[in-house]
Amino acid sequence: MQLSRFTDLGLRSLMRLAVSSGAEDRVTVKLIARQVNASENYVAKAVSRLAELGYVESQRGRTGGIFLTEAGRKTTIGTIVRQLECDNEVIECGGDNPCPLSNACRLRGVLATAQKAFYAELDRYLLSDLVDQRTVELLYMPVFPAASLIDT
């Protein structure tokens, strides 16, 4: 199963926020975009969705930024991915051009079972399981590798 770029950026944003040291570490969409080597616009869309889901809060203004909520810390990665991916089926058998095999095909069921197993594995992890001291060290390097790609 392949996750969308949107979900990838949402998870990377959450990981960045998980290593934030609090009020003295002001995290913005621009900073996250630079650190994960992604478009600021794409990161902003992912962060906006995370805010809608209650996993992050944002504050505007000079001292504002993005902050991880308690829900962001306590919700399983599986739940977050389901919500960011909108829990879509792996394949679409109907629609404008329905599959002629759909009445006799078992593929859809097999893939649905595999998808459930995929999410069940992700449900074993919280955000804190995805970050460690190496993550912190990479993000706080004086010259982060991605930083040279985008002007500050």
Image (tube, rainbow, N blue to C red):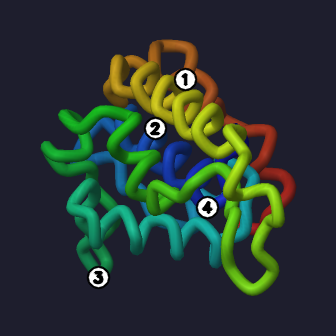
Q: Which mark is first along the chain, 2 or 1?
A: 2
Residue 17, by quadrant, is top left
Residue 32, compared with residue 1, is above or below; it is: below
Q: Which mark is first along the chain, 3 or 1?
A: 3
Task: Give the quarter of the figure containing the N terminus.
Answer: top right
Tags 3 and 2 touching, CB below 8 Å: no
Tags 3 and 4 touching, CB below 8 Å: no
Could you give the CA–CA distance between mark 3 and mark 2, rounded to whole angstroms?
Answer: 23 Å
Q: Amino acid at mark 2?
A: Met
Q: Which mark is first along the chain, 4 or 1?
A: 4
Residue 12, compared with residue 121, is above or below; it is: below
Look at mark 4 in the image and give the residue it sits on: 6
Tags 1 and 4 touching, CB below 8 Å: no
- Seen from the viewer's position, the closer of residues 132 and 62 is 132
Could you give the CA–CA distance between mark 1 and mark 3, rounded to whole angstroms?
Answer: 28 Å
Q: Amino acid at mark 4?
A: Phe
- Seen from the viewer's position, the closer of residues 61 and 78 is 78
**65 relative position to 105: left or right:** left
Could you give the CA–CA distance between mark 3 and mark 4, rounded to whole angstroms?
Answer: 26 Å
Look at mark 2 in the image and give the residue it sits on: 15
Question: What's the residue at 52%, 73% (across, down)?
Answer: 44
| Front disc: 3 or 2 | 2
Look at mark 1 in the image and give the residue it sits on: 135
Question: What's the residue at 78%, 47% (across, down)?
Answer: 146
Which residue is most to the top? 133
Look at mark 3 in the image and give the residue it sits on: 61
Q: Which mark is first along the chain, 4 or 3?
A: 4
| Front disc: 3 or 4 | 4
Q: Amino acid at mark 1?
A: Thr
Could you give the CA–CA distance between mark 2 and mark 4, rounded to whole angstroms?
Answer: 14 Å
